[in-house]
């Protein structure tokens, strides 16, 4: 994941431009000899977007770890042992979703991953040091709520109810799955979250929209660490377009 996040440094620091030799003759005094002049070609929106897209694909593909599967062939939708990462739109196109029967059962937390809404969201992280800090801090904050491997799970029942367990914390609620849009809506008490649900290699990934992960933490936060919640909220608010994915496996 750190390799993936490191792409933002290179992406943010690169731009598309080219140089060509002008065949127009610069005239000074009469009879002056024509001399080719090197000019910088201004990038158009199309060429710039194409170049940025190519850079993004090449960088993410090259920087993905050796266990990752690059499903699009351009690095924009990656899966490392079922845990997806990359650009949201590409991920939704690349991976399938489980149906209402397959989702039933208990799924154990496998790990978290960052998903980016756009190329700009990647660039917003600014540097490798910042990217690493964000990744480390988010994992630390989630672990304080026992959202970590070995003690966190989610159970979906046939009747549309579910139970989320994070150590000593429990959330009971109802869910609705739209297999066409890949949206999973979960309601618990006064809170409701919507996540995109994608499936790969026996793993379901809940990619939360906006403050979905924060609402989940609010629901278990009555017994939790409010200062931890505040710190995570502050951290995430600095990076528009960054979403946290939670992966679960049976």
Image (spheres, helix red, strand yellow):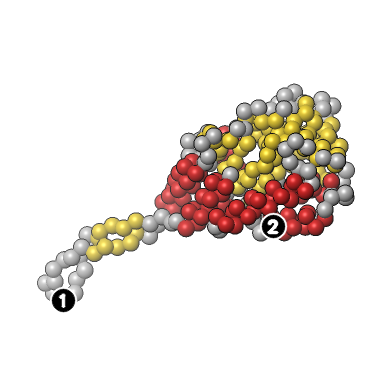
Q: Position of residue 241 (x, y in %)?
A: 63, 52
Is residue 225 depicted above or below 86 in this figure?
A: below
Picture quadrant of residue 188: top right
Residue farthest to the bottom?
Answer: 29
> Callout 1: 10 Å neighbours few (<14), some, many (20+)?
few
Res 120 visible = no
> Residue at (16%, 66%) from the top-left corner?
34
The one nearer the camera, 153 or 100, is 153
Q: Which is more toward the observer, 234 or 142?
A: 142
Of label 2 and label 1, which has the lower sequence position?
Answer: 1
Residue 204's place in the image compared with 136, above or below, is above
Q: Residue at x 76, y 42 (%)?
A: 147
- Reply above or below: 75 against 119: above
Q: Secondary structure at mark 2?
A: helix
Residue at label 2?
235
| Residue 140: x %, y % from top left | 71, 50
Say which quadrant the N terminus sits in: top right
Left or right: residue 126 compared with residue 159: left
Can residue 160 be seen from the camera position used here? Answer: yes
Judging from the image, what secondary structure is the residue with disc 1 in? Answer: loop
Q: Residue at x 21, y 68 (%)?
A: 26
């Amino acid at each position: 994941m750190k390799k993936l996040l490191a792409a933002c440094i290179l992406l943010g620091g690169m731009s598309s431009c080219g140089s060509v030799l002008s065949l127009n003759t610069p005239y000074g005094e009469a009879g002056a000899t024509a001399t080719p002049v090197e000019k910088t070609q201004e990038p158009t929106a199309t060429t710039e977007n194409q170049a940025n897209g190519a850079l993004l694909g090449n960088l993410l593909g090259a920087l993905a770890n050796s266990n990752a599967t690059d499903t699009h062939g351009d690095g924009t939708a990656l899966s490392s042992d079922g845990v997806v990462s990359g650009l949201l739109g590409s991920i939704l196109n690349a991976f399938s979703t489980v149906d209402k029967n397959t989702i039933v059962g208990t799924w154990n937390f496998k790990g978290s991953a960052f998903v980016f809404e756009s190329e700009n969201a990647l660039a917003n992280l600014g540097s490798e040091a910042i990217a690493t800090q964000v990744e480390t801090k988010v994992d630390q904050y989630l672990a304080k709520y026992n959202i970590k491997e070995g003690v966190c799970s989610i159970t979906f029942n046939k009747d549309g109810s579910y139970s989320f367990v994070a150590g000593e914390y429990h959330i009971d609620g109802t869910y609705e799955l739209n297999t066409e849009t890949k949206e999973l809506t979960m309601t618990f008490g006064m809170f409701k979250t919507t996540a995109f649900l994608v499936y790969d290699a026996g793993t379901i990934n809940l990619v939360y929209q906006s403050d979905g992960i924060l609402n989940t933490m609010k629901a278990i936060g009555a017994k939790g660490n409010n200062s931890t919640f505040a710190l995570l909220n502050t951290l995430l608010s600095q990076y528009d377009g960054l979403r946290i994915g939670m992966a679960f496996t049976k």
